[in-house]
Image (spheres, rainbow, N blue to C red):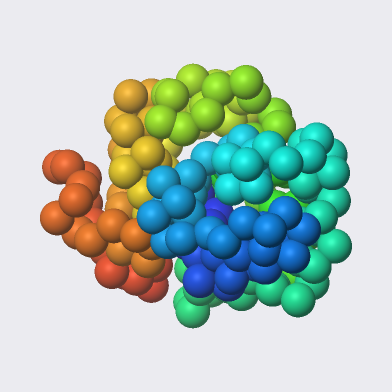
Amino acid sequence: MIFDMDDTLLATREVKWAHHRQVARDHYGIELTDEVLGRHWGEPFDQMIGHLYQHSASVDQMRAANQASAHLFPKQAIPGAVDVVTHLLDRGLTVGVLTSMNTANALVDLSRCGFPMNLLAFVQGADETPHHKPDPRVFTPALETLHAMGITEVTYVGDALIDERAAVGAGLRFVAVTTGLFAAEAFGESPVIGSLVDLPALV
């Protein structure tokens, strides 16, 4: 079982849109709209901040500007998410995380929110592959890790259409959870749940 992170395991969009608005305004004099934020939401982090902050500085400088105030906008675990991951691990499933965030930041967020980091098979961030959702090749490092463990039946759980496209394209089962921008009817033939607490019943 592989999970997307933002808006799947962690409640991200509302708090981080506010964060990006502050950084864009205070550092670069840019007023971000919901339309612009929504258009680039889910992109690899360095690519996303380039679009949001209009490439007003180098990637390193934009990343530093974002990180300087990140502690003021902490992500929180979606209710029930830690319990669901722990339950699946207790049932003997192998669990990993694949996210568009950079790996180091993802590890910090997941650990701070109480996920059992020592039991996860991997946390793969955008910096670990040149391919990004919706490109199915984004799963190559994760699947290589799982296949080396003898695991061939894999489900990806995510909240976005790019999650579904990437997973289906990679030959994975996909389960959509409607805790992000997309309602149930936006997804294709994939199973859809309204809350992660409903996931164990599908496994």
Whether residue 148 is visible, yes or no, is no
Q: Could you tell me residue 198's position as x and y percent?
A: 32, 69
Residue at (80, 67) in percent of width and height: 69
Q: Could you tell me residue 161's position as x and y percent?
A: 32, 43
Whether residue 166 is situated above or below residue 12 in the rendered picture:
above
Residue at (53, 40) in percent of width and height: 43
Residue at (53, 59) in percent of width and height: 32
Q: Is residue 156 left or right of residue 191?
A: right
Write down the quadrant of residue 58 in the picture. Answer: top right
Foreground of the two, 110 or 203: 110
Whether residue 185 is situated above or below residue 154 in the rendered picture:
below
Q: Is residue 125 left or right of residue 13?
A: right
Quadrant (top left, top right, bottom left, bottom right) of the C terminus: bottom left
Q: Could you tell me residue 105's position as x and y percent?
A: 75, 52
Foreground of the two, 30 or 176: 30
Q: Is residue 169 left or right of residue 1?
A: left
Residue at (67, 68) in percent of width and height: 22
- Residue that extends furthest to the front in the rendered view of this protein: 29
Whether residue 35 is visible, yes or no, is yes
